[in-house]
Amino acid sequence: MKKGISLILAMAISISSLPQSVFASEKGSPIVLDSTYCNECLNGNSLDLECYKKCLEGISNVDKDAKSIDPKDSVFYEAKIALVKSLMQPFSWIVYYSIGRIAQKVSQLLVRKQVGKIEASTDPLEAIKELDEGLSLIKGQENAKKQMRSVVLGIVDQRNHCDDLEKGNKGATIIYMIGPTGSGKSYSAEILTKILTGSKSKPFIIEASDIDKQSKKTSPVDQLFGMRLQREDGREIYKQSPLVKQLSSTPELVIIINEYDKMHTPDFDEKLRTMADQGYINVDGEKIDCSKATIIITSNESSLSVNSGNNNSCSSDDGTGSRTSVKHDKAFTGRLKVIEFEPLTVKDYEEIAAPIFEAVLKRYNEEYGVKINLGDTLKTIARKVSIQNKGARPIFNFVDNLKQTILNNIVLNSLNKKDCENKMYNVSYDEDLDEFILDEVEFKEEVSQEP
């Protein structure tokens, strides 16, 4: 860095000391010829034309009416310009290359400062405290939370003894989260990112929709880790993929791969295993350091899928709900820190739905003054969601339906907001009609009890 800056400064000084004739390229530009002007020819940074004409007599023909001197009138001009161009050409490439490299380093430093830089706590107990706070919104999953605590403790402890790790050539850390859809895997991955790299860090997220598995030209591995052909200024050039570019500038990067079972290939397993074993990947002959990277993978696989290794007889359903099955090599699964999420219970769904529904009812109460009682509706919804076996996501569909029911049956039937005030409704869910029912009841004003 210091050598590059010194080189640029030295070149700038050298260029500034060149005569003005070096930069004369168009007709009408002032030109200074060392052997032809006298001390009185110069007037500041320009020429005294009358004096210069007298000095130039006998050397070149000058138009008496000219307001400036044509550089091509000088017999020395072409030779001087040719010499200067031949000398400057290699320097221009050096300047261009040096500035480009400096800009690249500055860009990498800015990226490292904003994304993926480790600013997390180095105190294992403090990290666990922050983890528990982040996972408090996830209902149930006590076994998965326990496994995450263990993983975080191990990673933080390793970082505190990085010298020992370097001797052991430690590679990337791969955390493999498996479980039913909607059980909290993606949310937990984001929490782990903040715990391991700081609250301001941003992971590099890869979704199944980002990969074209039907492509016959490029595999998922090439799409993510290979060079990409891009068109710039009318030319086709190869550049590093966004993932490789980010990884090369941020070795501590957290990579989240969601729904890995939908993009899995044996080559993909092998690439991840290489990152875990060697701590680097080769991209177009360049070694990209990933020894400090953390890869968090979410998958809807069953525990049998991950633990069976090369066994083809593993079932896609281990009795815990709709799950997928992927054939992995044991060399890959042996490098994983597996965290298993279990299917949510009816009670879990009810606990997840309660704050969401209460927030909606509070908003309508504040906006329109209407009061709505849920009663046992949450239990009915929790049971319906459990039967669907799609995780907690269907809860939001029920929330949207309730909001639309309130708008259609209360808000639209009122001339203004005051018509909604001092009205109370009980909510029930009709499973046969698959809709919410609102029954207006006598309004009872709540009386605060003073001690």
Image (cartoon, grey):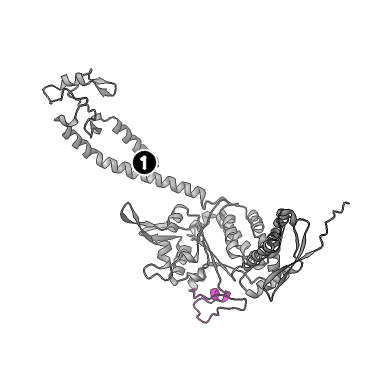
Q: Which residue is mark 1?
A: 4
Q: Is residue 137 left or right of residue 277?
A: right
Q: Is residue 271 left or right of residue 32?
A: right
Q: Is residue 269 left or right of residue 11?
A: right
| Magenta residue span | 300-329
Q: Residue at x 15, y 25 (%)?
A: 63
Q: Percent position (x, y) of residue 108? A: 44, 48
Q: Residue at x 35, y 35 (%)?
A: 9
Q: Is residue 41 visible?
A: yes
Q: Residue furthest left?
A: 58
Q: Indicate the secondary structure of the residue bearing disc 1.
A: helix
Front-lying residue, 289 or 283 = 283
Q: Residue furthest top?
A: 40
Q: Residue at x 19, y 29 (%)?
A: 70
Query: What is the quadrant of residue 306 in the picture?
Result: bottom right
Residue 162 versus residue 210 in the image, above or below: above
Question: The disc labelled 1 sits on which kind of residue?
Answer: Gly
Query: What is the quadrant of residue 322 in the picture?
Result: bottom right
Q: Residue furthest front?
A: 415
Q: Percent position (x, y) of residue 281? A: 42, 61
Is 313 contained in the magenta span?
Answer: yes
Q: Main SS type for the magenta part?
A: loop
Residue 234 versus residue 147 in the image, above or below: above
Crowding around mark 1 (Cα neighbors within 10 Å: few <14, some 14 to 19, many 20+) is some
Front-lying residue, 72 or 365 = 365
Q: Percent position (x, y) of residue 396? A: 63, 65
Quadrant of the frame with the N terminus = top left
Q: Percent position (x, y) of residue 151? A: 59, 62
Front-lying residue, 186 or 427 = 427
Q: Residue at x 32, y 43 (%)?
A: 96
Residue 313 versus residue 85 in the image, above or below: below
Q: Is residue 19 visible?
A: no
